[in-house]
DNA sequence: GTGAAAGCGCTAACAG
DNA sequence: CTGTTAGCGCTTTCAC
């Protein structure tokens, strides 16, 4: 292994060293610059002999193509922008992984950024991403500022809104109905015979819709109200613990099923229950959301709503790729979800 | 809310609609294209009156700057590439978050990609990222292919290797000694009076060095060997559970302290212990690594090695920014770590 | 304070 | 199969 010790030039001013360009490579190989371009983008169009010479020149010079120039000239950046509320939430990052992986097969690269839950900040990031001239853009959710919509529309590229559905997407959307997942969870709980319910939710818009779905159906069917605790938009194990503690200590909850807007929150409830010596599901039953990897391995194993995050990323990628090929495709993809019954409820 | 329904043009061929350029904006504002450029990059150089006209024209046209062209001309992309082994592991994503946040203040954007643990795949991604001409690049770890090192060196930009330290960084490195964290954990366990030890580790290179550090010191001091279970590079709760199960069932471990290469693994051990009715820390004590958010909220609360992931991202960002300003800075930053004593050991 | 000219490094026609 | 000619939309001198 080469022991490299050197200090790259300061990067304030443009790098001093003259860039190695296709011109350089071409000169060394005894051909013109265009031929180098062809050798790289469409090798079939170049004779084996000159191809060899060019490859040699590339190796010698350590040439690295300038995708900036390429994108400018071809008007195709091979870049797909993706904006998610949080980078640290596996729920999004696992979806991004499948998106990246499928797009990579088509030689597209993902430009990822974190928007938080503020549409204004999202708007700003949309602008900076659009300035990099991506070939498509993927957003989380269906709520964006009016200005963001204008920019998106004006960009003339495929726009995919993920994680939710609407009748009027900007362009395409793939997701599912959040309130329906909540209603399904309530139906499941009712079928199981639980006769009291509560809810713990993260404060973001989609999580709240899941909670409302649960509470609404529960109230419709039983006439009971559903006490709830709402936390910050990004849910933590600690919030789940606090949530159960409050439900028990201040709402006087003794037993029943608790609907959590995420598996992490549910895991927190499980943890707090263990710490308090409450039996799950006998005393407290818990339903999570997301079916993260850990859900099957908590103790007791978590009953949860499964949404296929890889599928989300995959469908988004497929839709984009289809658009690139000029196919026209249905604007909204309604992904299904299901209740995974395990031991916690 | 505007109800937009429209189908963007197919993107196979270059988008049909003529792009709105600085030229367009300038014409509308009655000035030349350069003036628009100045208005955007250095408003002071433009008279208030024309500035106003330009801003108006920008609003009317919905002009979005083309950062590709800007980067090509200025030889500065305002882009920083970052490569991490995993997007879904909070350990990396939380570091990326602090890196992004600080770089954003300097108007730099992060281009993030996932490399997995294979240096060859990393090399490939380094190439594609370098082709986008980032102004700096951040890598995970200090092991890279020889070819990757060449490209990195040739790029003439700041290169930061994160999460580890070495005497011969490619350019800069900021991290800590992994084996030292393991040794510190062993010392802690010895001080606490534990007289038997085992280890569970993820299979990646740095995790294994943490485990070795622990085992080596333990053996040096006690003469005992340390049974261990090693899993895939990305650790899961399930692996932690399996790890404890194997340690108990096949290695006949009855009691002692278990060193885990991550908090997630440790959480799994806690879970399996609960499922088996083992008391923590009386029967089985557990030491994690990372001090993730959840570590303080497991039951019992996790004793762990804290490394400040935000600090990692922050220091990387500061180093890069310093380089941009032409300052020259120490090539290696050794970040400290500490043992957080909670209830699990 | 503003403009004209000359590229940045590449791809896209068009020739031959 | 290969080369020539034009740009892509900006920033960077250098003038005025």
Image (tube, coloured by chain):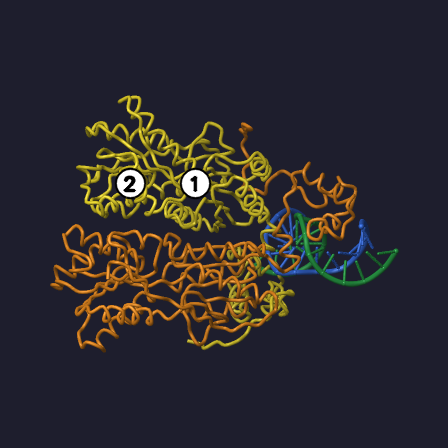
Chain colours: A yellow, B orange, C blue, D green
Chain of the residue under label 1: A
The location of residue B17, given as percent across then percent down, is 63, 38
Compute the Cα span from label 2 to label 1.
36 Å
The location of residue B26, given as percent across then percent down, is 74, 44
Chain of the residue under label 2: A
The numbered disc on residue A244 is 2
The location of residue B247, given as percent across then percent down, is 16, 61
Helix, strand or loop at disc 2? helix
Q: Looking at the picture, tell me which residue is in the foreground, B283 or B148.
A: B283
Q: What residue sits right under mark 1 in the picture?
A: A316
Q: Looking at the picture, tell me which residue is in the foreground, A54 or B327.
A: B327
The numbered disc on residue B18 is none
In the displayed structure, does residue A213 sit left or right of residue B219? right
Q: Residues within 10 Å of mark 2 (few under 14, many from 20)?
A: many
- Identified at 40% across, 58% down, the residue is B115
Q: Looking at the picture, tell me which residue is in the foreground, A5 or B1.
A: B1
Above or below, A62 against A151 in this view is below
Q: Looking at the picture, tell me which residue is in the foreground, A12 or B254.
A: B254
Res B260 → quadrant:
bottom left
């Amino acid at each position: 292994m080469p022991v490299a010790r050197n200090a790259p030039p300061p990067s304030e001013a443009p790098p001093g060293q003259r860039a190695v360009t296709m011109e350089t490579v071409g000169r060394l190989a005894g051909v013109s610059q265009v031929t180098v371009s062809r050798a790289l983008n469409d090798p079939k169009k170049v004779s084996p002999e000159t191809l060899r010479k060019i490859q040699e020149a590339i190796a010698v010079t350590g040439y690295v193509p300038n995708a900036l120039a390429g994108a400018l000239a071809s008007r195709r950046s091979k870049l797909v922008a993706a904006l998610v509320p949080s980078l640290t939430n596996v729920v999004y990052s696992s979806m991004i992984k499948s998106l990246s992986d499928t797009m990579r097969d088509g030689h597209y690269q993902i430009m990822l950024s974190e928007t938080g839950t503020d549409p204004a900040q999202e708007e700003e990031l949309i602008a900076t991403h659009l300035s990099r001239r991506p070939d498509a853009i993927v957003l989380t959710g269906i709520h964006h500022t009016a200005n963001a919509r204008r920019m998106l529309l004006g960009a003339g590229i495929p726009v995919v809104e993920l994680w939710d559905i609407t009748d009027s997407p900007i362009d395409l959307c793939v997701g599912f109905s959040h309130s329906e997942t909540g209603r399904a969870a309530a139906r499941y709980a009712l079928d199981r015979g639980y006769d009291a319910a509560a809810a713990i939710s993260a404060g973001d818009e989609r999580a709240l819709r899941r909670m409302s779905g649960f509470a609404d159906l529960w109230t419709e069917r039983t006439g009971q109200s559903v006490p709830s605790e709402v936390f910050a938009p990004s849910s933590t194990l600690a919030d789940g613990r606090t949530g159960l503690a409050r439900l028990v200590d201040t709402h006087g909850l003794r037993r029943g099923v608790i609907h959590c807007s995420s598996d992490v929150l549910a895991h927190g409830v499980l943890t707090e229950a263990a710490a308090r010596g409450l039996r799950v599901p006998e005393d407290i039953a818990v339903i999570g959301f997301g079916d993260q990897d850990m859900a099957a391995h908590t103790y007791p194993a978590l009953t949860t709503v499964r949404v296929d995050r890889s599928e989300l990323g995959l469908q988004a990628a497929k839709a984009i790729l289809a658009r690139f090929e000029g196919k026209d495709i249905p604007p909204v993809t309604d992904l299904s979800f299901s209740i995974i019954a395990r031991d916690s409820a």
